[in-house]
């Protein structure tokens, strides 16, 4: 098991000013950090990769697609823009040394049609992501598609639907991730959700029901860790939390009040929580 921390708690663009945070996370005992990819200029990421390597942190990466680059759009030009964005993000991941690029890039985040997903939309998205996966394979990067709750997207909202989507797309470098925040909203039974997607799950986000410190809310943590261990999950467990430090991101994630004492509190306690729960899972 590897334990990671998503840098979106501090920034959407990791630069040299965040190096002290990286060193702090390494000091806490994290194995790696998840780097957000919004800007796709390669050189800053090469420098960041060198710094992470010096510190002893591995990297994973995360990106999204917007309405101007939508893999599920009926407009072929927007699907192509989505593919182009994903290819650039894959290039960045390779420059970072990241073997995994995760995120809800199956469709445009925050964009709704007023209806559920159509068969055409699902097929368009699968075709776009299959092409992205072919490109990712040449870069030794795996794509981890994230489903979101129904208030953030409409194409993929559950583990079962996402697992079906991935299996139909049928590419070895196209897999999915499981996020405890979205599952807490959408799944009727957490254990069944984890089991139904276990054979295509490549990444896990550990996120509390209010996006604060894992273990301080009401996510079904015992069931989560027990079932992940039961299904032999052995990838990354990466903390994803959001606060008030970044106004635009706080607005996007609907964070209107202070959810935790400090970033340091969250990062330290989250790591201890994950390690202790993973160690005790399966021992009852």
Image (cartoon, helix red, strand yellow):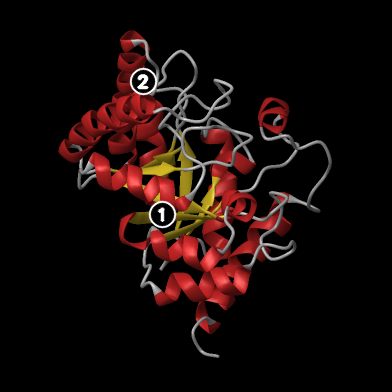
Judge whether 152 appears above or below 216 on screen: above
- The numbered disc on residue 226 is none
Quick one: label 1, few (<14), some, or many (20+) residues within 10 Å?
many
Q: Quadrant of the C terminus?
A: bottom right
- The answer to whether one can see residue 99 in this image is no
| Residue 9 left/right relative to 196 | right
Residue where numbered disc 1 is placed:
203
How many numbered callouts? 2
Q: What element carries label 2?
A: helix
Q: Where is residue 137 in the image (x, y as percent from the top left)?
A: 18, 40
Judge whether 272 appears above or below 39 on screen: below
Q: Position of residue 126 (x, y in %)?
A: 30, 32
Q: Where is residue 159 in the image (x, y as percent from the top left)?
A: 46, 52
Q: Residue 138's quadrant in the figure?
A: top left
Pick out the residue farthest to the right: 257
Q: Position of residue 175 (x, y in %)?
A: 31, 48
Residue that appears at 48% across and 24% down? 108
| Residue 273 left/right relative to 71 | right
Q: Residue 273's quadrant in the figure?
A: bottom right
Residue that appears at 36% across and 20% down? 82
Q: Which of marks 2 and 1 is nearer the N terminus?
A: 2
The CA distance from mark 2 to mark 1 is 22 Å
Q: What element carries label 1?
A: strand
- The answer to whether one can see residue 225 in this image is yes
Judge whether 189 appears above or below 60 on screen: below
Residue where numbered disc 2 is placed:
82
Residue that appears at 48% across and 72% down? 227
Pick out the residue farthest to the bottom: 284
Would you say the residues marked 2 and 1 are in contact, meaning their CB atoms lie under 8 Å apart?
A: no
Judge whether 170 appears above or below 118 on screen: below
**Front residue of this view, candidates 259 and 168:** 168
Quick one: label 2, few (<14), some, or many (20+) residues within 10 Å?
many
């Amino acid at each position: 098991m590897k334990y990671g921390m998503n840098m979106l708690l501090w920034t959407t663009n990791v630069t040299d000013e965040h190096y002290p945070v990286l060193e702090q996370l390494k000091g806490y005992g994290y194995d790696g950090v998840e780097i957000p990819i919004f800007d796709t200029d390669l050189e800053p990421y090469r420098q960041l990769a060198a710094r992470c390597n010096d510190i002893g942190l591995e990297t994973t990466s995360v990106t999204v697609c917007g309405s101007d680059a939508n893999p599920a759009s009926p407009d072929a030009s927007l699907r192509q823009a989505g593919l182009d964005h994903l290819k650039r993000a894959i290039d960045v991941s390779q420059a970072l040394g990241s073997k995994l690029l995760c995120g809800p890039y199956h469709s445009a985040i925050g964009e709704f049609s007023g209806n559920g997903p159509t068969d055409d939309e699902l097929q368009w998205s699968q075709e776009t992501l299959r092409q992205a996966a072919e490109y990712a394979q040449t870069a030794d990067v795996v794509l981890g598609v994230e489903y979101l709750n129904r208030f953030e997207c409409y194409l993929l909202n559950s583990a079962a639907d996402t697992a079906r989507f991935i299996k139909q797309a049928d590419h070895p470098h196209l897999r999915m991730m499981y996020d405890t925040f979205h599952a807490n909203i959408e799944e009727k039974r957490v254990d069944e959700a984890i089991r139904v997607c276990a054979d295509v799950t490549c990444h896990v986000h550990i996120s509390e029901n209010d996006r604060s410190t894992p273990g301080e809310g009401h996510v079904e943590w015992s069931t989560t860790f027990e079932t992940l261990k039961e299904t032999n999950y052995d990838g990354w467990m990466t903390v994803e939390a959001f606060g008030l430090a970044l106004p635009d991101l706080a607005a996007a994630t609907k964070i209107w009040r202070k959810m935790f004492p400090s970033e340091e509190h969250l990062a330290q306690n989250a790591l201890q929580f994950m390690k202790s729960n993973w160690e005790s899972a399966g021992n009852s």
